[in-house]
Image: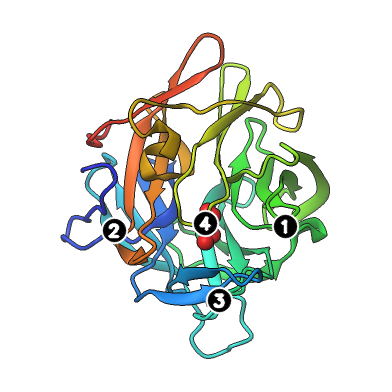
Amino acid sequence: MKNGQIWQDIDGNDIQAHGGCIIKHGDTYYWYGEHKGGDNKIARFVTGQEVSRVDVIGVACYTSKDLLNWKYEGLVLESEKEDIASPIHTSQVLERPKVIYNEKNNNFVLWMHIDRPDYSYAGVGIAVSDSPLGPFKFLGAKVPNKQDSRDMTVYKDKDGTAYLFHSSNRNKTMNIARLNEDYTDVDGSFSSVLEDQEREAPALFYHDGMYYMVTSGCTSWDPNAALFAICPHIVGKWKLIDNPCDGKYARQTFFGQSSYIFEAEGKFYLMLDHWKPDNLKKSGYSILPIEITSDNCLIIPWQDEWLGI
Ligand code: GAL
């Protein structure tokens, strides 16, 4: 699979799983992401700036045993076509879907960025399913802890506590909000980190006593330089370190933007979206291995191809 390009599933159709995540359950990898298979439209941010969008179709799921051959499993959460007041109506914004497994309830919880077409709502949506293949039941949308929330991810810590990481304070700050035991809501405890750094697209992992967070800058669909931050505690004083990308076009994150970091066979991999603002449904993907140095630095070189694990 050529990194930076749109990839195809085992039936030869374009993989529609943008802004997504890959989780492993049993011996299967599940890739969830935004189905952006509609035609481009133009919307406007509250600032008046034009932004391309597609109508919400839903959250797509693909499965694989080898991270190379992906089978389309359909939409695990579908947009609402009739009720215009629904937060997941086709006319709204549903981005960056992330799924975590809840051991207590033996179910799967899906979090996503929910917004109006002008991005003025800035909230999250939550849905649950007993099966990783869905269908997920939409529980509703909210503004977590009354803090605006745009790009986001959810991260499950070693002790089973899960957190919502979300760009807040008009994307100036990253908030870390603890979830309740069911992972279906925030529990009221949150802190703000990377203040005034304007980071978004958070992707996290933990290795050997250190948490790592890769983020992008805030330039809509256009690429910018990724940065990684570290902290020995999940809720602590996160410190921005450097751009982890290495080589040609490192300053543009190889024309991609972080969406998720997953672990496979003891190694960590960064997923990138390569947005095509003129035709969002053709936006590409990359999966790049992450090297971790002994002094807690990350190095992510470009690779032309994703060859699996
Ligand atoms: C990016 C963000 C994407 C999407 C886009 C819309 O900054 O990472 O998820 O929201 O803006 O312009």
Q: How far apart are marks 3 and 4 (CA)?
A: 17 Å
Q: Position of residue 90 (x, y in %)?
A: 49, 80
- Label 1 crowding class (10 Å Cα cut-off): few <14, some 14-19, many 20+? many
Q: How far apart are marks 1 and 2 (CA)?
A: 30 Å
Please tell me whether mark 2 sits on a helix, a strand or a loop: loop
Q: How far apart are marks 2 and 3 (CA)?
A: 22 Å
Q: Name the residue under label 2.
A: 15
- Residue, far top: 294
Q: Name the residue under label 4.
A: 220
- Label 3 crowding class (10 Å Cα cut-off): few <14, some 14-19, many 20+? many
Left or right side of 63 for 222: right
Q: Nearer the viewer, mark 1 or mark 2?
A: 2
Kind of residue indicated by mark 2: Ile
Q: How far apart are marks 3 and 1 (CA)?
A: 21 Å
Q: Is mark 2 within 8 Å of ligand 1?
A: no
Kind of residue indicated by mark 4: Ser
Which of the 4 image quarters holds residue 1?
Answer: top left
Left or right side of 62 for 79: right
The circle drawn on residue 92 is 3
